[in-house]
Amino acid sequence: MKAPLGRYELLLVSAGVLWGTSFAAIKIALNDEADPVFIALLRFIVGTAAILPVVYVMKRLNLRMLIYPPIILNSFLNALSFALQNAGMATTSATNAVLLVNTNVGVVAILAAIFLAEAITPRIIAGIFLGMLGVLFISTGGDLSAIYSGTFWGNILVLAAGWTWAFYIVLQKKILKPDVDVLMVTAAIIADTTLFLVPMTLLFTTSYVIPGDGWAAVVYIGLACTFAANLLYNAGLKKVKASVSSVILLMEVVSGMFFAVLLLGEMPTAVTAMGGALILISILVISFANGMSSHRSASRT
């Protein structure tokens, strides 16, 4: 019996919640001491160590998948995104990071229209505009002189990571064909991402010191936010449109901001809250536009 689509959407929601927790965990791991790229490498080493034995025991190992060109390209994009995100989070808050990363919903909608023939409408364009306005509020705190501050450039790095992930999402949708083994694809992406992070770490890391709490955070991020979340995400993305999946994953915003308050005591400023509200409105606008588009398509079939 064919599983209902709601199951796949729930998988994406679960992935979004887990990824949301990673922002607070990354801040704990960094602790103003650890190197951000090294932390990214460590989380993927843990993720690889967790998933490859599972693939082997389940007799699903396919070494050719590790050298499949689209997976190699997507693993590079993934590694670059995590390096940029962690570097940005060294100087900006978990709250800002989770909001800025998730502005990629608009970029995904554009790329999905170009490469996956998913509809883009005036509502989606309006949503993208609102989202970018929210980015401006969050990045500058309402003060354009903040462009010269470390926090601003941290925000820009995190934003660049989010937009790089937009390309990852669209390519991943093309990789996850109906006959593809989701478990092996996930393992290949995690393993290849680790390999790309090795030279990045060697080039940019100046200190390999990890604070005591940092190790616990790294293990958590590797198991929950890399191994488990990526498996849930790929399983859900296989059956859900790329543009719709990026909207569902904005559950990450709710989760990320909740745990930033709970674990880090980060209370958003009025300007950040305004920017976040604009981003959330843009998400709703784009979500509604995608829903209307899907309804029209269904009515024609």
Image: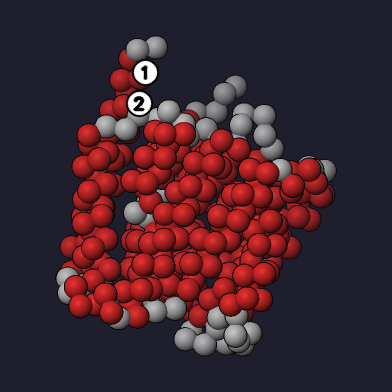
Q: Nearer the viewer, residue 50 or 154?
A: 154
Q: Residue furthest top?
A: 301
| Distance from the alpha carbon under mark 1 to that under mark 2 | 6 Å
* Whether residue 69 is situated above or below residue 240 in the rendered picture: below
Badge 1 crowding class, 10 Å Cα cut-off, few under 14, some 14 to 19, many 20 or more, is few
Q: Which corner quadrant holds the N terminus?
A: top right
Can you give x and y, in whole percent of width and height, for residue 97 in the image?
Answer: 38, 66
Q: Residue at x 61, y 31 (%)?
A: 177
Residue 218 visible at all: no
Can you give x and y, in whole percent of width and height, for residue 272 in the image?
Answer: 23, 68
Q: Residue at x 69, y 56 (%)?
A: 192
* Whether residue 226 is situated above or below residue 73 in the rendered picture: below
Indicate the secondary structure of the residue bearing disc 1: helix
Q: Which corner quadrant holds the C terminus?
A: top left
Circles 1 and 2 in contact, beta carbons < 8 Å: yes
Q: Residue at x 44, y 78 (%)?
A: 90
**Would residue 194 appear left or right of 58 to someone viewing this image?**
left
Q: Which residue is mark 2?
A: 294
Residue 124 visible at all: yes
**Would residue 216 appear left or right of 107 to someone viewing this image?**
right
Q: Which residue is mark 1?
A: 298
Indicate the secondary structure of the residue bearing disc 2: helix
* Whether residue 3 is situated above or below residue 216 in the rendered picture: above
Can you give x and y, in whole percent of width and height, for residue 148 in the image?
Answer: 28, 79
Q: Residue at x 37, y 46 (%)?
A: 107
Can you give x and y, in whole percent of width and height, for residue 63 in the image?
Answer: 80, 46
Amino acid of disc 1: Ala
Amino acid of disc 2: Ser
Badge 2 crowding class, 10 Å Cα cut-off, few under 14, some 14 to 19, many 20 or more, is some
Colouring method of the image? secondary structure
